[in-house]
Image (tube, rainbow, N blue to C red):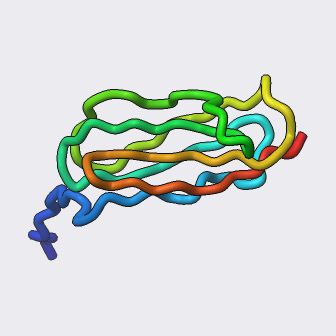
Amino acid sequence: SVDNTEYEFTAPHNFSLSQNYPNPFNPNTVIAFELPKSSHVLLRVYNLLGQEISTLINSQLSEGSHEVLFDAASLPSGVYFYVMRAGKFLQTKKMLLIK
């Protein structure tokens, strides 16, 4: 039999920010997110004091699924937060670095 199924790329319906993996991590972790349309994305990492540790992304990205690697080799163990802003979407998640 012939498979006549057509496969289409479908953009995500919503903005979403996934939990990093692995979590806890040492020293690298991946942060994944989805964009339903091309958007300017700002993804930053903060420590418990609210101080900015790193800007992972600050650019226009196409719709679809994206991943970014966060390298925390130079940071001490502890809880960190990552914050994604894209258009009106804003979300924060927590991650744990254990060395």
Q: Residue at the location (69% across, 52% down)?
A: 95
Q: Nearer the viewer, residue 42 or 35?
A: 42
Which quadrant of the view contains residue 13?
A: bottom left
68 vs 65: above or below: above
80 vs 9: above or below: above
Q: Residue at the location (25% across, 61% down)?
A: 12
32 vs 52: above or below: below
Residue 69 as seen in the image, left or right of residue 76: left
Among all residues in the image, which is located at the extreme top?
74
Residue 28 as seen in the image, left or right of residue 1: right
Residue 33: horizontal and vertical position, in percent?
Answer: 41, 51
Q: Residue at the location (79% across, 44% down)?
A: 97
Residue 46: horizontal and vertical position, in percent?
Answer: 63, 39
Residue 51: horizontal and vertical position, in percent?
Answer: 66, 34
Instruction: Check the picture and name the quadrant holding the C terminus.
Output: top right
Residue 31: horizontal and vertical position, in percent?
Answer: 54, 46
Instruction: Check the picture and name the quadrant holding the N terminus.
Output: bottom left
Q: Nearer the viewer, residue 88 or 37?
A: 88
Q: Nearer the viewer, residue 23 or 10?
A: 23
Q: How many marks?
A: 0
